[in-house]
Amino acid sequence: MNKTAAFIFVLFFYCLNAFPQVENVPLSNKVYDFLKLMSVKKIIPSINDDDPNLSRRDVADFLSQIDSKSIELSNTEKKLLNKYKIEFVPRERNRENTSVMFDGKGKFLKRFGEIFTKKKKYLYALDKENNNLYVEGLGNLYISQEIKPNKKHTASLMDVGIRARGTLFNHLGYNISVLKGAVIGSKDLAVTTEPNIKTTFHIAAITEDINSYDFANGYVRYHTEPMEDMDLSVQLGREQLKYGFGYSDRLALSGNNPNMDFIKFKFKYGVINYSSITASTVGEFKQIRNDRYTKYFAANRLKLSFPDVLDFGIGESVIYSSRGIELAYLNPLVFYKFVEMSLQDRDNATVFFDVQTHFLKNLEFQGTFFLDENILFNLSELDQYINKTAYQIGAYVYEPANIENLSFILEYTRIRPYVYTHFDPKNTYTAFGVILGHEIGPNADQLYTKLAYNFSEWVSLSMEYQKIRKGNNIVDANGNLIRNVGGDVFQVHREGIDSDEAIFLDGERVNTDYVLIKLSVEPIRDFIFDFNYVYRIDNNITNGFKTDFSYAFLRMNIEY
């Protein structure tokens, strides 16, 4: 290597690592969608979407790898790459593409006017040696209109907030954010439009005349590289978590639940990826304060990642309550199922296995097998209620028929009766009444398809179709249980009352067709407009009637 090449290499390496940011990128950031496309296209390796929370430095590294293969990208992909480089790669930022409202440089009115430009925007930014700080304003506006059956139902949701994030001393990432919002109009339609507000206290408790909601997140994360190709991190705090594979939803941890408070340990070395979580959450909401309780979620996951071939993982989780943190589940290097038995079989333990392929360009397969009970001694009687298993298989196709910027997903999920239930109602696989795993719940299956197209770096269109079949428990007009078929996550099998046989999709059969069309437009950078149309038909096969429901809503999301 000559001196000029060596100098360029050193300069590049220094710039790439200047002001490293080890705080995580929120899972709602659309850069994850772009990285997924690039992974399926085999431009970059696996993005670890079984445990998808990436640091900003991880994202910057992926973007640098994509940049090195830019010749293989479409024009739209190149524009998306340049867009995200400005956001995640520090050396790409300058006064021409980035605006900071309160940086004290130049005229304030000029910086204020840059709100309406394509520049990346911050309220405040500081990069100094190995420390940095970024402050961003947050806001959402939803305007929702029911179409069927009642056109008079409307709802508006408005929230504002702030986020501060950054890295200290080159290794300690931090993030703190808060959102406060209110609902005007139909509360039911508002919850349908934005399901996350359902698990906020003021919405659930109805303690105020105005339906309000709030979200608060924050954490610290220490990251180090003790040797080459080894990553080690410890995180304490609260943010959205997902665990396991799944295109539509995940069997292990979907992220639909309210964000949990957790301690998380991650280790990566060579083909080994290992993580461990201990988290706390709450049970189903109760109006009587003394009936409310804390529950705990713990999970371990080991994944072996073989580049250009496949990723294979095994994970486990346990849910427990009615006591403080169990020291046994704080241990990141122990098999929870055996530990749970040693603690006298009080808790809800699960095991799951999954795989994701990487050997075909533009085509990825993945599958998950979820085990909520030990069926090894009941292999000849798989229709028994104790067979609490689920599986999911899917495929992700990019650029089918050589159509650039087009992606297609096909996935099937099947969940047997009684999955996610537990003999102790406090230990159901839920948080704040929301299933931690796949939203269709037990005794159901789902066929999921999605077609998405990027017209440009600022405009995209997606269409989803779901066919869901569900076997509900049979109840009378007053809601009293007549026959339990394992279709309700909060209704456990009752020994001596319910049949030991649990036939899949038994009970009150309801078939659902669900369509979602979404157009996303970003006319001004960091101001995203999502136009959504939803149509749903519930066909009650057992009782012979149909109901249809449709609505449309506009969401404006701001991160400044």
Image (spheres, rainbow, N blue to C red):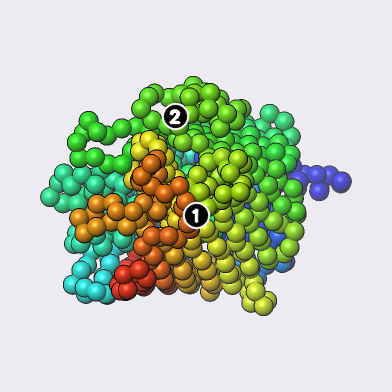
> Is any atom of residue 359 visible in this view?
yes
Figure label count: 2
Q: Are marks 2 and 1 in contact (CB under 8 Å)?
A: no
Element assignment for label 2: loop
- Mark 2 to mark 1: distance in Å? 23 Å
Image coordinates of residue 502 in percent, x first then y, are 46, 52
Image coordinates of residue 207 in percent, x first then y, are 16, 44
Question: Left or right of 236: which side holds 58?
Answer: right
Amino acid type assigned to the residue bearing label 1 in the image? Ile
First in sequence: mark 2 or mark 1? Answer: 2
How many other residues sit within 10 Å of disc 2, few (<14), some (14-19) or many (≥20)? some
Question: Left or right of 493: which side holds 152?
Answer: left
Q: Residue furthest right?
A: 1
Q: Residue furthest front?
A: 496
- The residue drawn where x is 61% and y is 41% is 376
Amino acid type assigned to the residue bearing label 2 in the image? Arg
Please identify the quarter of the rendering in which residue 41 is found. bottom right
Question: Left or right of 350: which side holds 556?
Answer: left
Image coordinates of residue 151 in percent, x first then y, are 21, 74
- The residue drawn where x is 81% and y is 48% is 5
Element assignment for label 1: strand
Residue, disc 1: 415
Image coordinates of residue 470 in percent, x first then y, are 42, 61
- The residue drawn where x is 75% and y is 53% is 309
> Is any atom of residue 157 visible in this view?
no
How many other residues sit within 10 Å of disc 1, few (<14), some (14-19) or many (≥20)? many
From the viewer's side, name the closer residue of 379 and 180: 379
From what the image shows, is residue 518 above or below residue 269?
A: below
From what the image shows, is residue 21 above or below residue 232?
A: below
Residue, disc 2: 346
Q: Residue furthest top?
A: 327
